[in-house]
Image (cartoon, helix red, strand yellow):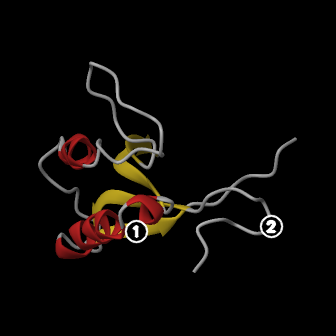
């Protein structure tokens, strides 16, 4: 599986939603920030973190239609395959919904 969408040339991403497969809100409420904090050390080659804590560009928290979620960039696999497996297993172990991201065409 390629980490780049051949049509758009953009990296592939997916969302881990803060909803279980039964539709229940996942707790604790800061789960996305905690998960992204654990993943913050994974950065593109040559890109060093700053003195303050910053999320990795490959794993970042956000809101999607009012639901907390984590956006995961599959290029994480290039840096550390086990890190990508970790976030996938986190979602699976907690019965969280995973949704493939799609890109909207540019105007």
Does 2 appear above or below 35? below
Question: Quick one: SS at disc 1?
Answer: strand
Measured as percent of width and height from the top left, residue 56 is found at 38, 41
Does 10 appear above or below 46? below
Q: Which of the 4 image quadrants contains residue 9?
A: bottom right
**In the rendering, which numbered label is found on residue 98?**
1
Quarter of the image with the N terminus in it: bottom right
Measured as percent of width and height from the top left, residue 85 is found at 31, 72
Q: Which of the 4 image quadrants contains residue 57?
A: top left
**In the rendering, which numbered label is found on residue 36?**
none
Measured as percent of width and height from the top left, residue 20 is found at 26, 67
Which of 68/84 is in front? Answer: 84
First-in-chain label (2 vs 1): 2
Instruction: State whether residue 52 appears in this view.
Output: yes
Image-based side of 14 in relation to 93, left or right? right
Question: Quick one: SS at disc 2?
Answer: loop
Residue drawn at 18 percent across, 74 percent down: 93
Residue furthest toward the bottom? Answer: 1
Quarter of the image with the C terminus in it: top right
Residue drawn at 56 percent across, 60 percent down: 101
Please report contact status of discs 2 and 1: CB closer than 8 Å, yes or no.
no
Residue furthest toward the front? Answer: 46
Instruction: State whether residue 66 appears in this view.
Output: no
Q: Mark 2 points at which residue?
A: 7
């Amino acid at each position: 599986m390629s980490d780049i969408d051949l049509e758009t040339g953009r990296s592939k991403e997916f969302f881990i939603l803060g909803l279980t497969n039964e539709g229940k809100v996942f707790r604790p409420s800061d789960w996305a920030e905690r998960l992204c904090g654990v993943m913050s050390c994974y950065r593109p080659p040559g890109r060093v973190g700053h003195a303050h804590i910053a999320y990795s560009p490959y794993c970042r928290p956000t809101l999607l239609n009012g639901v907390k979620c984590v956006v995961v960039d599959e290029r994480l696999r290039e840096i550390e395959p086990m890190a990508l497996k970790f976030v996938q297993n986190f979602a699976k172990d907690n019965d969280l919904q995973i949704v493939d991201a799609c890109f909207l065409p540019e105007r």
